[in-house]
């Protein structure tokens, strides 16, 4: 998952819930990580252009839903962007700006339409050799949902499932019977005590994406890890960060919160707000590069303490 995991739970079976939850997260990581040569994702990538690979139902479900939203967003979201992720290698020692020719060549291997699915056998094939899946924008959210199921099985009424602040779920209210208050990171200030603002949630998923998580600056330009699959480059949409809150009654709330924040980041403020307003049970905010903050009306009910570095569009 490439993140720090924090699981909190209160109740008679809290210890069991947390231990089983961590075990499930590790299991999903071993199945979905492209860095693990034995994972289902690595096996799919290795067989690209050659054959179908039967995978764990959880991995199949992630891929199938991801492809569905690729179609809905006309390619603004695409998990076949793995070859682009490898090319830039942002966050690692070899991070660099590729040449235009390298990017153009890699883009010929990015196309969600070439992700072929066989539902009956939970099998997946990439149509072209050299294609590469990357579940980095969906796996943490899926894990949140899986841990939430475990919490429900152990009758946890109060808890917090936190996959590195980018994907989390608040179970019920805190032990003091108050909503969980989550600080949204200031996109341009690394101080742990400085936030964009505070979001209050209960029985809801919270997802956040930002250009500050993994990036490097070269010649005054910030190159971050959120790629636009249509250009093969870090998204230049005018967004610094964005967050969504999704009602726990929505199927796959955690996974969708993870995925939607990436989609919105790529779409930009105007199209991102349009995307948000067409979703049931979903509220969100977008922080633009000029410091303007856009929010759905429902998100305003959850939000407080906007940092003075930003201004909210009324």
Image (tube, rainbow, N blue to C red):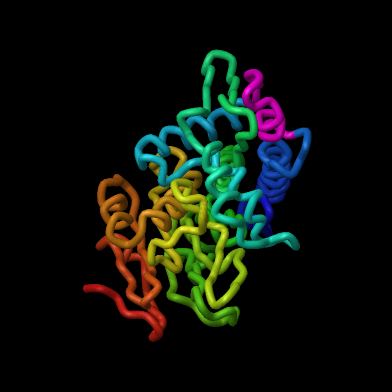
Q: Which residue lies furthest to the left in this view?
A: 314
Task: Looking at this view, name the residue that lies furthest to the bottom.
Answer: 308
- State the image coordinates of residue 73 (x, y, percent, origin top left): 36, 42
Q: Position of residue 67 (x, y in %)?
A: 46, 33
Between residue 59 and residue 84, name the one nearer to us.
84
Is residue 47 on the magenta stretch? yes
Q: In which quarter of the image is residue 21?
A: top right
Residue 170 visible in image: yes
Quarter of the image with the C terminus is bottom left
- Displayed quadrant of residue 290: bottom left
x 58%, y 65%: residue = 213
User: In the drawing, does residue 266 fall left or right of residue 225?
Assistant: left
User: Nearest the camera: 7 or 152?
Assistant: 7
Q: How many numbered tags mark residues here?
A: 0
Residue 218 vs residue 199, the one in the foreground: 218
- The answer to whether residue 203 of the structure is visible from this angle is no
Classify 189 as above or below 107: below
Is residue 123 placed above or below 217 in the rendered structure?
A: above
Q: Position of residue 103 (x, y in %)?
A: 56, 50
Q: Is residue 141 above or below residue 63?
A: below
Rendered location of residue 254, percent (x, y): 49, 47
Q: What stretch is highlighted in magenta?
A: 39-55
């Amino acid at each position: 998952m490439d993140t720090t995991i924090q699981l909190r739970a209160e109740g008679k079976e809290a210890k069991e819930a947390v231990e089983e939850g961590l075990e499930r997260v590790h299991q999903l990581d071993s199945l979905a990580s492209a860095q693990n040569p034995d994972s289902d994702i690595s096996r799919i990538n290795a067989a690209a252009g050659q054959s179908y690979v039967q995978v764990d139902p959880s991995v199949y479900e992630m891929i199938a839903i991801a492809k569905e939203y690729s179609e809905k967003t006309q390619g603004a979201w695409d998990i076949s962007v793995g070859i682009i992720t490898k090319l830039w290698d942002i966050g690692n020692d070899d991070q660099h700006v590729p040449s235009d020719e390298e990017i153009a060549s890699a883009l010929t291997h990015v196309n969600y339409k070439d992700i072929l699915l066989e539902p009956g056998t939970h099998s997946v094939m990439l149509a072209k050799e050299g294609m590469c899946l990357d579940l980095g924008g969906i796996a943490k959210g899926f894990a949140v949902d899986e841990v939430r199921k475990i919490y429900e099985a152990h009758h946890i009424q109060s808890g917090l499932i936190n996959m590195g602040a980018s994907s989390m779920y608040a179970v019920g209210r805190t032990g003091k019977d108050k909503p969980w208050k989550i600080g949204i990171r200031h996109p341009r200030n690394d101080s742990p005590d400085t936030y964009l603002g505070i979001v209050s949630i209960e029985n809801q998923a919270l997802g956040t994406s930002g250009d500050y998580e993994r990036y490097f600056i070269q010649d005054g330009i910030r190159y971050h890890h959120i790629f636009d699959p249509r250009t093969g480059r870090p998204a230049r949409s005018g967004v610094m960060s964005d967050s969504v809150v999704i009602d726990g009654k929505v199927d796959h709330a955690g996974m969708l919160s993870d995925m939607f924040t990436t989609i919105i980041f790529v779409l930009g403020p105007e199209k991102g707000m349009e995307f948000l307003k067409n979703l049931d049970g979903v509220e969100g905010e977008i922080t633009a590069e000029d410091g303007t903050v856009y929010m759905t009306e429902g998100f305003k009910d959850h939000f407080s303490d906007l940092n003075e570095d930003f201004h909210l569009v009324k």
